[in-house]
Image (cartoon, rainbow, N blue to C red):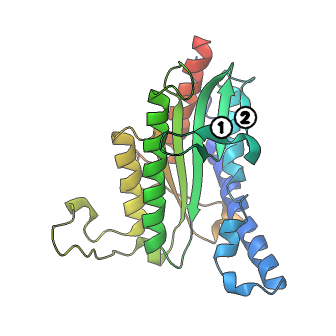
Amino acid sequence: MALDLVDYERKAQAAVMTFWRSREVAKQKQLDSGKADRGERAGVTAGKNMNGFIELIVDLVRENGLEHAKIHQKRAVLTLPGYFRPTKLWDLLITYQGELIAAIELKSQVGPSFGNNFNNRTEEAIGTAHDFWIAYREGAFGQQLRPFAGWLMLVEDAVASRSPVRNSSPHFPVFQEFRETSYLKRYDLLCQKMIQEQLYTHAALIASPRKAADSGEFSALSTMSSLKTFVTALAGYVATEAARH
């Protein structure tokens, strides 16, 4: 049976428009309430900016054989046991017949500051994955096959995120692939490396400019980290699980 990618490009465009518009709404509310000093943080802490991508993922699960899977979106049911910490709060969990099918993180970053945020996102993503897989190994989710672990990141496509950045490493040289790279390229490399090291079943990077609030415009930096590869991998995993059950 062919995989159903649920017209993902159109739905992703709608999700991108929702992302940028919800940020603007949240930012305007902060301005109206007199808390303008929060700046760009207002849109980030609004918390619902990536809901359009959750809807896309839910459609992928439903249309590839697990129409009766449980989709967990409310905060109270989004925690999984960890190994280095008691629990970890995920952005989306999918279970079926008592098994964990998928655990997915949905993140975003916009300018003007990319440097510190990139480092924080990197450390968070790697730490989360490491904790998750050791917990799985130790039987935290019961005796089951490896679930799908996904990481999806939307980054503002802007001059600041596409400009080469110098590195400071006075004692030892930085790996060649990171030299004079932009923050967008660094996120692309992060996704590729996390896939190669099996930290995530798949990791995707979406680059989108602010003007996409009206157009839904987005792009990929590489085939490996593209949204198309992400949705294909997830659809394939879900179809396999559906056949197995």
The image quadrant where one finds the C terminus is: top right
Residue shown at the point (66%, 48%) measured from the top left: 53
Q: Which mark is residue 93?
A: 1
The type of residue carrying mark 1 is: Leu
* Structural crowding at the residue carrying mark 2, measured as other residues with C-alpha within 10 Å and reported as few (<14), some (14–19) or many (≥20): many
Give the side of residue 142 with respect to residue 182, left or right: right
Cα separation between marks 1 and 2: 6 Å
Residue 166, image x, y percentages: 29, 76
At mark 2, the secondary structure is strand
The type of residue carrying mark 2 is: Ile
* Structural crowding at the residue carrying mark 1, measured as other residues with C-alpha within 10 Å and reported as few (<14), some (14–19) or many (≥20): many
Residue 116 in which image quadrant: bottom left
Residue 35, image x, y percentages: 76, 84
The image quadrant where one finds the N terminus is: top right
Q: Which mark is residue 71?
A: 2
C-beta proximity under 8 Å, tags 1 and 2: yes
Residue 155, image x, y percentages: 53, 63
